Amino acid sequence: MTAPNDVVITGIGLLTSLGEGVEANWAALRDFTAPVIDSERFAPYTVHPLPEVDWSQQIAKRGDQRQMEAWQRIGTYSAGLALEDAGIKGNEALCASMDMIVAAGGGERDVDVDTMILKRIADGASDIGVAINEVLTTELRPTLFLAQLSNLLAGNISIVHKVTGSSRTFMGEEGAGISAILTAAARIRSGQSTHALVGGAYNTEHPDMLLSYELGHHLMRDAWRPVWQRGQAAGGGIVTGSGGVFLVLERRDHAIERGAKIYASLGTVAADLGPTGAQETRERLDRLAAETGLGETDIVFSAVSGADGRTADEKVFLTESLAGIPVRGLTTATGNLSEAQFPLAVALAALSLSTGEKLPVLDPDFETEADTAPSSIGVLAIGFNAAEGMAVVRKAEGATA
Amino acid sequence: MTRFTDHAGRPVIAITGAGVVSSLGSGKDENWAQLTAGQSGIHRITRFATDHLRTTIAGTVDFMSPPEAGSVALSYAMAEFAVLEAIAESGLSQSDFGGPLFLAAPPVELEWWQRIALDADGATSGGEPGYQRLLHAARTGSHPAFFQSAQFGTIASRLQQRIGTRGLPITLSTACASGATAIQLGVEAIRRGEAERVVSVGTDGSVTSEALVRFSLLSALSTQNEIPEKASKPFSKDRDGFVMAESAGALVMESLESATARGATVLGILEGCGECADDFHRTRSKPDGSPAIAAVRAALDDAGVSTGDVGYINAHGTSTPENDKMESMSLSTVFGEAMRSIPISSNKSMIGHTLTAAGAIEAVFSLLTIRTGTLPPTINHVNPDPAIELDVVPNTKRAATVGRVLSNSFGFGGQNTCLVIAAEPA
């Protein structure tokens, strides 16, 4: 069943509200009772905040840390965790030939500078354009732009971890994370690449990040509840989380040759985008499920966004098209990590398969017990605004993780 | 190697359509006429107030969408135009293209006029100006257009809907190499056999005062505002930075086999792509130029050609002191003594640096160079930099038969991507 050019997962880097590293995250999920949330700081919104992190563990130079805004630090840090986990960190030859696809949004703006400008204008500045220029030219930090620029997360990973084989940054919310994994896997399978660092990072603890969701009325304002239960909650159904997720994907023979541990193998990945009406969405989901074999898996790990309409459509798809297959809405535990959502679900699927441990029910009202430890897991992501993606992750034969 | 496969046994990639918009105009004919006439599209900025700004010139595209519509609307409008021109030339369907879309687009965020409008709306909450008011306005009002303009996937979604591309479109950024990366991703998809045809487009309509301030703070922009059309002077001694500009460029690419089967006109061959990331610094390249050198070599290797096969180089040539020096040094390393006799010119001397779109529009101009036998000039070349010994096709176009072009794109964040484009095989 295995081929030398199979795609296997050999490294996982996780930094979420549940903790840092694969062990802490898996332990928190295995014994899940409640998420780590903060409902005060951005009230009326709840977020899953980042834990305390000693950045120097993966970003040795203070100077490098200072050149990044939070999401870049989160990403660079979790990329380091993944490289370390794969036994590639510090290996110059493997890093120099390693491909990289990063799923990224934009960086964080300077809240103080923005506030200064808004105040100047609210106070009746005579020429708005001139007032904006005046404040920006005098107050903006020279290096902030680089700390905001989408492709500079990848740039920082190159600088800090020396991954330089190739560097591509995909954008577009959850869809970017889906495309990143899809493309990296397709390149490996076809012989265009041997090993790749793939993932994304998101910092939700910034008002501008919340604003981009709330302009579409997507954020939940009621007391926290599991992701499947938000249809009647005040506001939308999204509760966001900070976090970074990176994977090392590798050709099976490349991994075996260097004696790497193999978490799991990554089967077909498929994705689509189109009008988000219920029926059109369902047609795409059914087609993607047939393409990937999602219906033949033991359990589905869903990166469910929580967005009202999209989540309602997802529930119908799960109950009708995947009837009888247990599902776990991972977002209940971590919050929505945007670009990192799909990579997160793939990572947790690989962890469940390699540990041979089941993920418990995260929401007893919608999710059902799984009988046995899975040998294959379907990964599903339906983007809150657009894009759908699926993948099948299988237990690695002779896995050593 | 057969007619339809390359030196590595992969499908040969045919270019069957190309489209452009720049400050010089819309469409290939208008752009090429102006570009080969040495016409500059750089002008004084009128779209917004430039008081307090160190740079007050740019190559803005002011004829595609109303100025108040904002960057996302302009980036979309230019991309749509370029894509439709490319698809029309290819003879494929403009509403049911049937292959994947690879889009290089600038990062998006709410614009100032939107923030200001929200803050004013949020004033009813009684709070101080700032994000609390913006969030209040977002929560209590209806802003679907603002919402979509702040989503990174919006332009690709709209394009997909407009032209009927398939699958999940990829929106990407590799800074100033983005346009080339969009083409590279398309090439790779055809080589993998995932698609018979792709459309790759780079677009950038993001000249705003904040963008100018950001680049100014990095000392990246020319401040030679007095005569706008003379500010961009790649490879000149007195070059002092790039001139920000807007454009879109698109290519339709197909496997040569499928293009031939449907009787399409093959405009050229996309022979190879190469890239290498730099781990040295966020804005500066490694002093020995090794990543740029590796990217050029990777592109030539990928194309299965050697340095002697390249007839012309479409330079990244930004007009920054750093880039032009590094590019010259890197090329001299790869090409050796022969570099003195290979013509190389920079479109940016006329259209400015169109950032996310640059690699795509320059690929279109590379193709036109081959097809018309005309090398576009590097204008404003009055004080050559004595440290740069290149034939930059100074100031006026030159007739030349070119069989193969190397097109370079180097960007912030250590992004280096090069393309090799060749004439249709006889």
Image (cartoon, rainbow, N blue to C red):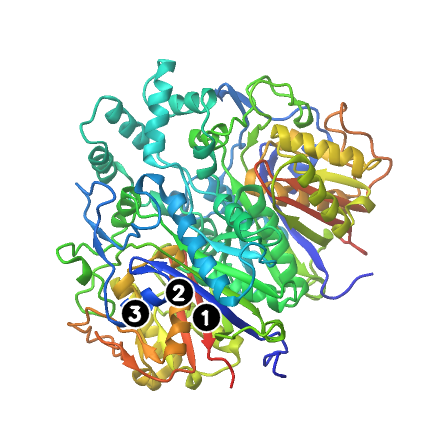
Residue designated by label 1: B419
Three-letter residue code for mark 2: Ser
Label 3 to label 1: alpha-carbon separation: 24 Å
Q: Badges 3 and 1: C-beta atoms under 8 Å apart?
A: no
Q: Are marks 3 and 2 in contact (CB under 8 Å)?
A: no
Residue B163 in view in this figure = yes
Amino acid marked by disc 3: Ala
Badge 2 marks a residue whose secondary structure is: strand
Instruction: Single out the mark in the foreground, 3 or 1.
Output: 3
Q: Helix, strand, or loop for circle 1?
A: strand
Tell whether B3 sits left or right of A292: left
Using residue B65 as the reference point, say whether residue B219 is left or right of it: left
The three-letter amino acid code for the residue at tag 1 is Leu
The answer to which of marks 3 and 2 sits earlier in the sequence is 3
Residue drawn where x is 32% and y is 28% of the image: B116
Query: What numbered label is drawn on residue B409?
Result: 2
Query: Taking the image as drawn, is residue A87 in sight?
Result: no
Chain of the residue displaying label 3: B
| Chain designation of label 2 | B
With respect to residue A394, does A384 lie above or below? Answer: above
Q: Point out the frontmost of discs 3 and 2.
A: 3
Q: Quadrant of residue A286?
A: top right
Q: Are marks 1 and 2 in contact (CB under 8 Å)?
A: yes
Mark 3 lies on a secondary structure that is helix
Q: Are marks 3 and 2 on the same chain?
A: yes
Which residue is denoted by mark 3 in the rendering?
A: B33
Q: Position of residue B346 (x, y in %)?
A: 30, 69
Q: Earlier in the sequence, mark 3 or mark 1?
A: 3
